Image: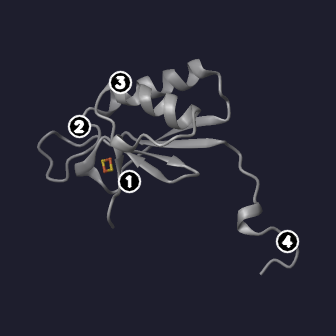
Amino acid sequence: MNETATLALSEVPQVYKRHVFACFQQRPPMHPRGSCGASGAQPLWERLGKQLEASGQRDIVMTATGCMGFCQAGPIMVVYPEGVWYQPKTPEDVDEIVRTHLLGGELVERLVIVPHI
Ligand code: FES
């Protein structure tokens, strides 16, 4: 144990106000596991990136990820620090998540999924 550590977990400064992880995993269309890429993720995440850039909010960022384990639900994204998983299907869904959750701090309940491990 580090004897100089004095911060509690809840006291660690956060780098970003919100951090979005978006799954870009691509598998072939008939792959048994499916994939977010095969479910149309790429144009949605491109839109998400453009919307965030246009917002000018440098403390809200997106990171492209590989598979997060819930492929059949794709396309999926997760927003931290809240840990909310979303399943947007259209560009308008992405716009609503950006406007309402990422910028507004409110849940978009109709697009929430709760993956089960
Ligand atoms: S391919 Fe996106 S969660 Fe597995």
Q: What separation in Å lies between label 1 and label 2 (alpha carbons)?
A: 14 Å
Find out if the beta carbon at label 2 lies less than 8 Å from the nearest ligand 1 atom: no
Residue 36, percent from left and from top: 29, 41
Mark 3 or 1, nearer chain start? 1
Q: What separation in Å lies between label 3 and label 4 (alpha carbons)?
A: 45 Å
Which of the 4 image quadrants contains residue 5? bottom right
Q: Secondary structure at mark 2?
A: loop
Labels 3, 2: front one: 3
Picture disc at residue 39: 2
Residue 10, percent from left and from top: 71, 63
Mark 4 or 1, nearer chain start? 4
Under mark 3, the amino acid is Glu
Q: What separation in Å lies between label 3 and label 2 (alpha carbons)?
A: 16 Å
Q: Is residue 77 above or below residue 83?
A: above
Q: What separation in Å lies between label 3 and label 1 (alpha carbons)?
A: 23 Å
Q: What separation in Å lies between label 4 and label 1 (alpha carbons)?
A: 33 Å
Q: Which residue is mark 3?
A: 92
In the rendered image, the quadrant that contains the N terminus is: bottom right
Q: Which residue is mark 4?
A: 6
Under mark 1, the amino acid is Met
Picture disc at residue 68: 1
Under mark 4, the amino acid is Thr
Labels 4, 1: front one: 4
Q: Is residue 65 left or right of residue 12?
A: left
Find out if the beta carbon at label 1 lies less than 8 Å from the nearest ligand 1 atom: yes
Mark 3 or 2, nearer chain start? 2
Mark 3 or 4, nearer chain start? 4
Tell me the residue at 43%/25% (across/down): 95
Mark 1 or 2, nearer chain start? 2
